[in-house]
Image (cartoon, rainbow, N blue to C red):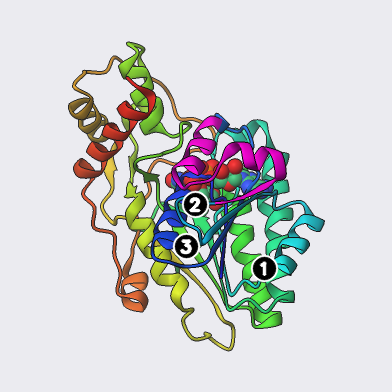
Amino acid sequence: MILITGSAGFIGHALTNVLAKAGKEVVGIDNLNDYYNPDLKWSRLADAGISREEVEASGEAVSTRFPNYRFRKLGLEDRHGMGKLFQDFSFVKVCNLAAQAGVRYSLTNPLAYVDSNVTGFVNVLENCRKHEIEHLVYASSSSVYGLNDKVPFAESDPVDQPASLYAATKRSNELLAHTYSHLYQLPTTGLRFFTVYGPWGRPDMAYSLFSDAILNGRPIKVFNHGEMSRDFTYVDDIVEGLRRVLVTPRPPQLGVPNRVYNIGNGSPVSLLNFIEIMERHLGVTAEKEYLGMQPGDVEKTFADTTALEEDYDYRATTDLDEGIGAFVKWYREYYKV
Ligand SMILES: NC(=O)c1ccc[n+]([C@@H]2O[C@H](COP(=O)([O-])OP(=O)(O)OC[C@H]3O[C@@H](n4cnc5c(N)ncnc54)[C@H](O)[C@@H]3O)[C@@H](O)[C@H]2O)c1
């Protein structure tokens, strides 16, 4: 049985559907917070067969689409609730995707990051330790590379110069996981995701903000005057990476069963090129408002994915044009625009 935290989230929903469809026993949790419109989170749950009425009435529900998927509304920082969850179910593996995401919001709401990403993550680790979980896989982020300007970013690069509190909490996850692996032999694997996009994507991310502005005739904000690049990674590629890594941890290194891998496309795209691709798929030319760099942001991300390829024989393959096409198709259907 697998626990997926953040299962109403963008990546959690996609992973849950794939594992549940493959017949795995899955329990998902999410606190359904309003960092972005919770209706999207409920819609993702509905897509996975979870009834909003039932969750609102009793706090949990079994999927009507996948009888092997059960959802419980729960926050990671609820120490008692998390303890009970691990007692109620016999988890073998845990995939922690729940987190307070977003770089910009961490400037105005730092404590939300501490609650979910630090206190909440330690609750996950403590329960994994107590219940001798076989493998904890958790989401880290390319943002841990912070002010590092050597590209591509390799796992051996220094990660001690975070540019945002979000990045600092994600790096803290890696350090906390290492500690538990060292002290208690808990197998942990962190995956540093690089800008994930695709159907059911987050409304706070540039591709959604751009689509909303472009389709509603508003100018799009182009930060750092367009001098940015991102290693965009399609959500299905992330899910396939998670699925493979979850199967088994790699053997311990120096006696510690702890690993961290980049998972990215390995081919960064400039922001202006990205906008052109979006314009083509949306069929509209965007009006652009060129602005300076946002605090907390970094100019470029670029994943060296050799380690994941060597250890798990896996690399992301979806081409940006194809992925943006799938995103725009979903966006128009979901938002009816
Ligand atoms: N999307 C990306 O580009 C990206 C890049 C790097 C890392 N990540 C990481 O991947 C993970 C998933 O990201 P996502 O894009 O799916 O984000 P998301 O916000 O859509 O999903 C996270 C989910 O976790 C839930 N959540 C937040 N705090 C919680 C808490 N304390 N208890 C229970 N549930 C909680 C939210 O309600 C949300 O549904 C996160 O850890 C994020 O930091 C994402």
Residues at marks 3 and 2 touching, judged by CB atoms closer than 8 Å? no
Residue 8 shows up from this direction: yes
Q: Position of residue 271 (x, y in %)?
A: 30, 34
Q: Is residue 5 left or right of residue 211?
A: right
Where residue 34 sits: x, y (%)? 62, 32
Secondary structure at numbered mark 2: helix
Q: Which residue type carries mark 2?
A: Gly
Q: Amino acid at mark 3?
A: Leu
- Identify the residue shown where x is 35% and y is 40%: 199
Q: Is residue 126 magenta?
A: no
* Disc 2: which residue: 12
Pointer 3 with pointer 1, Cβ within 8 A: no
- Residue 51 drawn in magenta: yes
- Would residue 143 be visible to someone looking at this image? no
Residue at the extreme top of the image, as rendered: 217
Q: Residue at x 26, y 18 (%)?
A: 286
Q: Which residues are magenta?
A: 39-62
Q: Quadrant of the N terminus?
A: bottom right
Q: Is mark 2 within 8 Å of ligand 1?
A: yes
Q: Would you call the spot at circle 3 few (<14 residues within 10 Å), some (14-19), or many (20 or more)? A: many
